[in-house]
Amino acid sequence: MRVIFFIMKKSYLACLLLLSLFSCSKLRNYLREPDTDRIIETLHSTCLTGRVATLAMSVVNGNLTDHATISRSNSGFPCSALIEIDLSEESDALAEQATIAGIWADAHTAVLSIIFSNYDYRLHIIELIGIETIPVILESEEIHMVLASQEISLNPDQDDRDALLSIDLDNFQFESEIIRLDMPRPGDVYVAVTQNAYFIDVNTRGTINNLADDSYSISGGGQLVEVENNSAEIVQQALIEVYISSSCRINPVSGMALLRVTGVEDEGFPELGTALIEFYDNCQGKAEVFAATGMYIGTNGKKLTFVL
């Protein structure tokens, strides 16, 4: 009860502040729903990375498919490998092709670099997205990995591509990457928002060569794909145990997300808004605003359209 009262009090004060700043007409134009596209794009990016890393672990362990080719340094472990995966025939893959370069210490432990070709970013296509040094561990039925936002480059030039695909780590560097997986998962959105990294856990249900039954859990904070760099706007987001089930691909079925925006519009109005969004098991393309302040204050308790 004390927490709810604090949120209501904070929202009331924010509303009074807004009323003192704007006229009624300006206030109506100012208030809006949270821009969930940013969160959706992050979920797309993390799930695609999880999917491709799972495929790479499957292929290097001998589960070859018609859509994947592999060239490896030797038949056993440790080894390095270059894997190319054709994603063009998969309707929900969001990219045409993935090229993975990796070092495997054994059948269960790897550090990967990935290049996605023709990534579908909603209204336009990004030619290339490069991601370097993703630590991956296969444990029983689950695959764990961590993806840091500073490791992502949009449309890397040829030198950067060559560097991504000629991944070269000594033992200390390899172990340092793997240790990142031991970092505790954030349990609070306000902690996660400062991490600039996402933890991706894939439940393969014991069938690593069958992606259709995989589920994904994502925790962390930051922004993975930023197409437009607007210096007047700062957008922060966080995810806590956002779970995408194999039985529901429309929306996450549990977990929470935070969206926080600080900036200035063209008209000079301050853009200030925070929304805490909760996912629940409905599979109807919906999510609920648990708490909101600033320009999102009118959406408290509202169900939003949230379709992956």
Image (cartoon, rainbow, N blue to C red):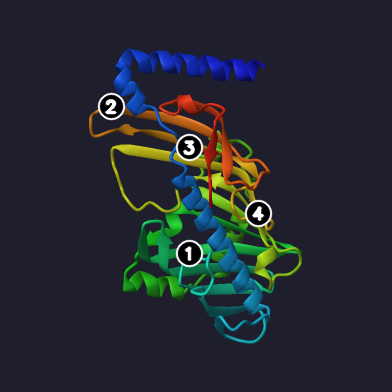
Q: Which residue does the numbered mark 2 point to in the structure image? A: 269
Q: Nearer the viewer, mark 4 or mark 2?
A: 4
Q: Label 1 amino acid?
A: Leu
Q: Name the residue furthest left.
A: 267
Q: Residues within 10 Å of mark 3 (few under 14, many from 20)?
A: many
Q: What's the CA distance linking mark 3 and mark 1?
A: 23 Å
Whether residue 222 is visible here, answered yes or no, is no
Q: Which of marks 3 and 1 is in front?
A: 1
Q: Check contact, mark 3 vs mark 1: CB within 8 A.
A: no
Q: Residues within 10 Å of mark 2 (few under 14, many from 20)?
A: few
The percent position of residue 158, horizontal first and vertical second, equals 33, 73
The percent position of residue 195, horizontal first and vertical second, equals 51, 44
Q: Residues within 10 Å of mark 4 (few under 14, many from 20)?
A: some
Q: Which of marks 3 and 1 is nearer the N terminus?
A: 1
Q: Which residue does the numbered mark 3 point to in the structure image? A: 259
Residue 94: assigned label: 1
Q: Which of marks 1 and 2 is nearer the N terminus?
A: 1
Q: Which residue does the numbered mark 4 point to in the structure image? A: 248
Q: What's the CA distance linking mark 4 and mark 1?
A: 18 Å
